Image (cartoon, rainbow, N blue to C red):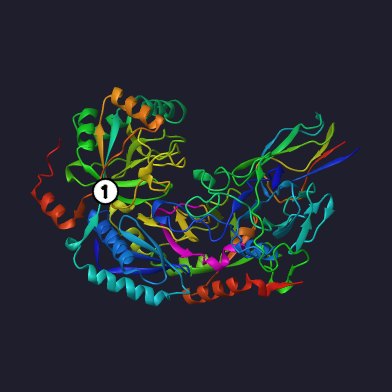
Amino acid sequence: MAEQVMTQAPGNVWKVLVKEGDSVAAGDTLFILEVMKTEVPHEAEGAGTITKLHIAEEDAVDVGQLAVEID
Amino acid sequence: MLEIIKPGLETSIQDFPGRIGYWNQGFPPSGPMDSWSFRLGNILVGNDAGAPGLEAQFMGPTIKLQSDSVIAITGANMAPKLDGEEIPMWQSVAVKAGQTLIMGPALKGARGYLAVAGGIDAPSWLGSASTFHKASVGGLDGNAIKAGQVLPVKAGKGQAGQGQPGRRVKEACRPQFASDKKWQIEAVAGPNDDWIDAAGHAQFLATEWKLEARSDRTGYRLDGPDWTFTEKATNKPPENGEFPSNIVDQGYPLGAINLCGQKPIILVNDGPSMGGFIVPYTVPSAAFWKLGQIKPNEFLCFNQVSVEEAQRLRIELDDMCTEASIES
Amino acid sequence: MIFDEPNFSPGGDRYITVEFGNELSLELNFMAQGLAGALEEAGTKGLVESAPCFASLLVHYEPRDISYGDMVSELRSLCASLGSTDEIELDSRLFTFETLYLDPWTKECIDDYREKINPDKEYDPDFVARLNGLEDRHQLVRVHSGSEYWVASLGFWPGLPFLQPLDPRAMITCPKYNPPRTWTPQGTVGMGGSASAIYPVATPGGYQLFGRTPVPIWDTGKRFDVFDGDIVLFRPGDRIKFQPVIREAYDDAERKIADGSYIYNIIEYQKFSVRNYKNWIDKLDRNERF
């Protein structure tokens, strides 16, 4: 089942830990935002394969932006 | 009692007007950044306008309510849900023991406020329950709330409106957030406005300053062009410092637009009380609520106002934070 | 330069900056603290608080109770009634703090900085001694500890006191770390520019480090009565003497602080007289060093 991972806060993309094609398990950290000098990790809800990455390190993002698609 | 299931992003106990009277020891007032939303939330549930409540930043908390009560959520829209059902904002809402409140990511604005009838029962540190976590002072243990903590709530005082659900803030009395990512922010010239030349002043007022993501309650970093200076900035005794914006260390007013080198940083609620950089403009207190709701990468456009005009705006705001703004 | 007349500027809707000059001189700080004292005594309606800094006073007022213009008039008239700086007398407590100069913890901190940030950083006491034409680090200790230090202001970090040496023979200077350190041990005694400081808690920082005191200047645990219900020990106008001690005495003080039996050394019966101070420094040969 397709999962859409949205950004949970506005900030900067600090680290992207996956690339398209990677397999992930539920709970794996996909990327980390920097918000107010704090790290905000974003995890996969379910297991799957990364089909699309919409963000890159150092991007400025808004909240509610589509960041990663998993299938 | 509020049981914290998920703390959100640096959610903290704050009260208004915060910690006052200790500026000469380096304590900023702390308190809520958007005191308009904060105070109205308290009034909705029948509290004194300044009673201790929670400030949530960008990502709200998940809280299990351990007793029957009345709450209100104001400020940024964090799509609050009670046991999975959306509840209205800007309105007092009855809650029952065992229910779970979820405040999610703020889609518009940045800071949401939770008021509970009676107010949060947090100890007073130097006259205020406001959290100043940089120095571990205030709140329950000097820091943002943590998962597993239980926040005690004071018993209601039997005031008019105490714990009555269904009270609402009139639409016209709610703060209006900028819809196009551009915020008009008032600024009063001074104290060090005479360090900036005419071109520098014109540029400050004409620029759309971008809020950097690394901004937080200690300082709001603005991205924009370089400033230009008068002779006062370059012809000064060497102990002032080497940059044109360096000055012999001075006290900073709350809301100071502090020019660190060429980087303007607005000193907000948890900011430093003194330092060695000039303050060409100061954001007046009536405009702080806007600072509390601007998101990173949105823009600030400054309008110069006089001291008197700024004072008038504050009185208007204070008049708004009263029972007169409530309807049932 | 000391301004002929203080300069008054607004800070937003509820602050006023009173500037006495644009240089670093104790005279300007005495004026700022003199005005702070006069304001408190006058009990002006609308005054919320004031905070002195090196050469200025920040005044916080309530505009509903007093207008900007009226507050400036009040400040002007208080400045005039202060008379010349020589007339100023301030209640001033004197604290004596056991201090282990050239201690192992600041050495460890400096070594860590050398390893992680700048391998060329010279051991701070040697560096500062050399910059100021002193014989060696031991003379630095004699010179630094030989003077009383004046609390000119508190801030930047809550409880962090900015100290100016009262004895002109202890006036030395040094640059700050560039880039700054990411940590400093709590209780470190250091110096940047011409100001000395004690780090109230472990924080990042940029001052050159000389020594360490075990005596708490920050008390959130309400452990010591001398704090009088406050979290911060110092007030502007206090004075501090750093008393060089050996390691055994440092450890003894630390033990007593841990078990709560430590007794602070505070003298509270003195008034600081600017006139007496000026007469004294006029008699000194500023080229002498301890």
Q: How crowded is mark 1: few (under 14 residues within 10 Å), some or many (20 or more)?
A: some
- Residue at the image position 29 percent from the left and 26 percent from the top: C249
**Which region shows up in magenta?**
B271-290
Vertical arrangement, residue C142 with respect to residue B239, above or below: above
For badge 1, the amino acid type reads Arg
B97 relative to C166 in the view: left or right: right
Q: Where is residue C36 in the image (x, y as percent from the top left)?
A: 32, 62
Residue C246 vs B28, above or below: the answer is above
- In this rendered view, identify the residue nearer to me: C201 or B302: C201
Q: Can residue B126 be seen in this view?
A: yes
Pick the residue in front: B120 or C202: B120
As for residue B274 lying within the magenta part, the answer is yes
Residue B142 lies in what quarter of the image?
top right
Residue B192 covered by magenta stretch: no
- Viewer-side residue, B318 vs B75: B318
The image shows residue B181 at horizontal and vertical percentages of: 68, 61
Left/right placement of residue B229 relative to residue C134 reads right
State the SS at label 1: loop
Estimate the x, y position of residue C141 in percent, counting from the top left. Answer: 23, 32
Q: Can residue C120 be seen in this view?
A: no
Seen at 58% across and 71% down, the residue is B318
User: Disc 1 marks which residue?
Assistant: C93
Where does the C terminus of chain C fall, quadrant-wise? top left
Front residue of this view, candidates B106 and C120: B106
Quadrant showing the N terminus of chain C: bottom left
* Chain that bears disc 1: C
Percent across and percent down for residue C20 are: 28, 63
